Image (cartoon, rainbow, N blue to C red):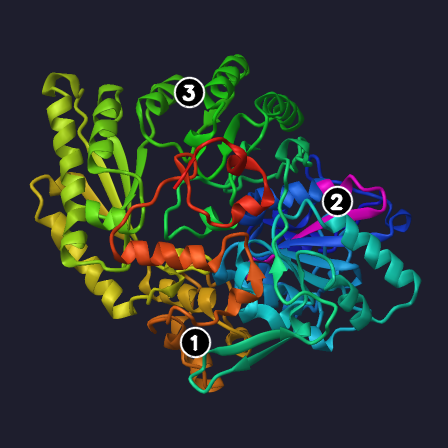
């Protein structure tokens, strides 16, 4: 292929990391653009190193390029230096593989993983010279489609997208592409094509749904404007993960990225039912991949990439039923090839520690616990199945095994939280330190001591969780709680061994607004972008005051979406979607939380959440009913 770079050598050498913009990496796919019917630009609206680490894009990129009639390419947010250059020199944003302008593509697809990237979506559209608002686009522009967890409340960005794909991407795209080819062949109008799209399961076209509001600002109704499209859009889901496409030739970057390794997805979903966790609800029910299939994928991917590390990906790897067999296989095959094995999302128990001892070097990395709350009462409220005894027993085993670094993750601002729960954070951290000194005699410490890092994030109530009815703390309340946590840690006997970190309260508050907002936020996001907001997920570029100005200029109260109490029967902006879990179940779990009642996990007993309607995964396993 003739490979001409869109940026001159002079421009590239002036950029911080020119490798972000040149493409042609190992395993990237090039095709003859005249030999395909559909060109698809796949975008992660953040910098290259973050976007290249995302598994979902690698899956869809590989799947789309397995179709003879489709060429999928990649595009990421140009970093601040390149963004300035693109604007000053009027260079249209281009795809990495062909270096062709995005505007000439058939589709521009965004995976939207976190709310703080919303202004970067507008950056991509703007630099591509695509109208920012869906209503202003013609057939001269790509169909702009969004997917990923944030589309489960797509309303704050509804005006910018033609289509949202709700659910897992492997199931419906072939049908969508065939429909596109048919409509183009028949010279159908753009609006008629979108109307046909809206009839497909899992496809949400926001322009075809009318939203009415009550006087108090809450939603009165959300209804389709056509009779032949669904009133509620149900998520798409892979019913058999072992039969679904999975990439064994992922693109290998030139530069170090956030997840610089082979990623092996072992299952989707989670049985645990933590009430704050959105992913646990969105990806229900838990579905496992066949272990023999995983062994083949692992060896193939390592051979095709040359990576020296493989990571198991899931929400809770300890719950994969064939984990011991898979680990033994990987240890046997990876140790020969000097390949490291990374095991995130493990519960810290004797089995996990034994495994980690086998796969980690003599230099032990830190152990991670996520108690999430400082007292057992609070852990019952959030349905976190982890006791203080579990933490101390796991710590004891770890210290015996030679670990001396522990990370503890907590949340502040959870529903029903009291000062006792906050001060309990320091108490747990101190007890872990005491456990170390009681477990490891002085003569065996080899000059080392215990090193504990306690981190708190601020709780953001997310759609499709039992806590979607909860109010969120104000910035001032968050900072007050962080201060109390710090004081609680400083009052401990072993405080010199405990370091405390906390998140930005401004960013958490903004995340809460964008997560729970409605269509009124579209104009605010547009205004914030026009005022220079970009890379909001990066602390050094997040402009909280500018966002507040945008809210004021648009006449929208941000606190309406965060600190307000919700009534049980309120219509939420995301009620237009069905994630497979019923609102009745979530409300029942909200009441259980307020009463401090724990719930079973999916393997102990069925809670009747609604996900059994898909008839797969853990829902088919034998167990008693609650």
- Give 375 or 395, whichever is nearer the viewer: 375
Compared with 174, 435 (above or below) is above
Residue beneath the point at 68% across and 44% down? 170
Q: In terms of sequence position, does the residue under pointer 3 or pointer 2 come before the other?
A: 2
- Give 592 or 165, whichever is nearer the viewer: 592
What secondary structure is marked by label 1?
helix
Q: Is residue 274 magenta?
A: no
What secondary structure is marked by label 3?
helix
Q: How far apart in space, not on screen, are marks 3 and 1 (Cα)?
A: 48 Å
Q: Residue furthest front?
A: 625
The residue identified by callout 2 is: 64
Q: In terms of sequence position, does the residue under pointer 1 or pointer 2 come before the other?
A: 2
Q: Is residue 68 magenta?
A: yes
User: Residue 46 at what x, y percent from top left?
Assistant: 55, 55
Q: Which residues are magenta?
A: 63-80
Q: Residues within 10 Å of mark 2 (few under 14, many from 20)?
A: many
Question: Is residue 33 something one can see in this rendering?
Answer: yes
The residue identified by callout 3 is: 359
- Give 53 or 447, whichever is nearer the viewer: 53
Residue beneath the point at 40% across and 38% down? 605
């Amino acid at each position: 292929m003739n490979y001409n770079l869109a940026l001159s050598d002079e421009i590239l050498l002036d950029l911080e990391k020119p490798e972000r913009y040149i493409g042609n990496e190992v395993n990237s796919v090039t095709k003859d653009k005249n030999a395909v019917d559909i060109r698809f630009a796949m975008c992660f609206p953040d910098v290259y190193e973050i976007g290249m680490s995302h598994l979902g894009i690698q899956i869809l990129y590989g799947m789309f390029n397995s179709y003879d009639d489709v060429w999928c390419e990649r595009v990421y947010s140009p970093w601040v230096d390149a963004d300035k250059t693109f604007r000053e020199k009027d260079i249209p944003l281009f795809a990495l593989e062909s270096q062709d302008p995005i505007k000439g593509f058939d589709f521009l697809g965004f995976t939207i993983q976190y709310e703080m990237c919303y202004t970067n979506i507008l950056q991509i559209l703007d630099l591509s010279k695509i109208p920012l608002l869906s209503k202003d686009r013609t057939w001269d522009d790509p169909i702009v489609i969004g997917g990923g967890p944030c589309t489960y409340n797509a309303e704050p960005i509804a005006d910018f997208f033609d289509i949202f794909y709700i659910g897992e991407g492997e199931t419906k795209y072939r049908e969508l592409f065939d429909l596109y080819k048919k409509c183009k062949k028949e010279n159908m109008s753009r609006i008629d094509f979108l109307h046909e799209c809206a009839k497909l399961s899992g496809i949400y076209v926001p322009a075809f749904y009318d939203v009415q509001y009550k006087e108090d600002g809450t939603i009165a109704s959300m209804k389709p404007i056509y009779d032949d499209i669904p009133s509620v859009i149900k998520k798409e889901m892979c019913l058999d993960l072992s039969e679904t496409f999975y990439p064994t030739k992922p693109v290998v970057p030139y530069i170090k990225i956030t997840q610089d390794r082979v990623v092996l997805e072992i299952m989707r979903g989670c049985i645990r039912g933590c009430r704050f966790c959105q992913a646990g609800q969105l990806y229900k029910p838990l579905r496992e991949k066949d272990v023999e299939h995983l062994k083949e994928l692992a060896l193939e991917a390592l051979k095709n990439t040359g990576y020296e590390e493989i990571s198991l990906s899931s929400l809770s790897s300890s719950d994969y039923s064939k984990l011991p067999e898979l680990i033994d296989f990987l240890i046997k095959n990876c140790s020969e090839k000097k390949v490291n094995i990374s095991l995130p999302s493990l519960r810290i128990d004797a089995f996990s520690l034994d495994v980690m001892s086998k796969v980690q070097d003599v230099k032990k990395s830190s152990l991670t616990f996520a108690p999430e709350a400082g007292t057992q009462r609070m852990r019952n409220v959030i349905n976190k199945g982890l006791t203080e005894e579990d933490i101390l027993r796991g710590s004891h085993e770890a210290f015996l095994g030679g670990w001396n670094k522990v990370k503890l993750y907590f949340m502040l601002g959870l529903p029903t939280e009291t000062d006792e729960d906050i001060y309990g954070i320091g108490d747990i951290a101190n007890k872990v330190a005491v456990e170390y000194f009681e477990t490891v005699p002085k003569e065996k410490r080899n000059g080392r001591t215990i090193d504990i890092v306690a981190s708190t994030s601020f709780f953001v109530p997310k759609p499709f969780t039992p806590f979607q009815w909860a109010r969120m703390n104000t910035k001032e309340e968050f900072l007050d709680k962080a201060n109390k946590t710090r004081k609680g840690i400083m009052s401990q006997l072993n405080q010199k061994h405990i370091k405390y970190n906390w998140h930005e309260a401004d960013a958490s508050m903004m995340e809460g607004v964008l997560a729970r907002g409605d269509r009124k936020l579209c104009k605010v996001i547009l205004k914030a972008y026009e005022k220079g907001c970009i890379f909001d997920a990066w602390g050094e570029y997040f402009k909280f005051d500018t966002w507040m100005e945008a809210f004021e200029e648009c006449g929208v109260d941000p606190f309406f979406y965060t600190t307000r109490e919700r009534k049980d029967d309120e219509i939420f902006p995301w009620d237009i979607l069905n994630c497979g879990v019923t609102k009745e179940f979530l409300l029942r779990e909200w009441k259980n939380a307020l009463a401090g009642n724990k719930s079973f996990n999916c393997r102990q007993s069925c809670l009747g959440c609604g996900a059994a309607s898909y008839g797969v995964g853990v829902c088919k396993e034998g167990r008693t009913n609650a």
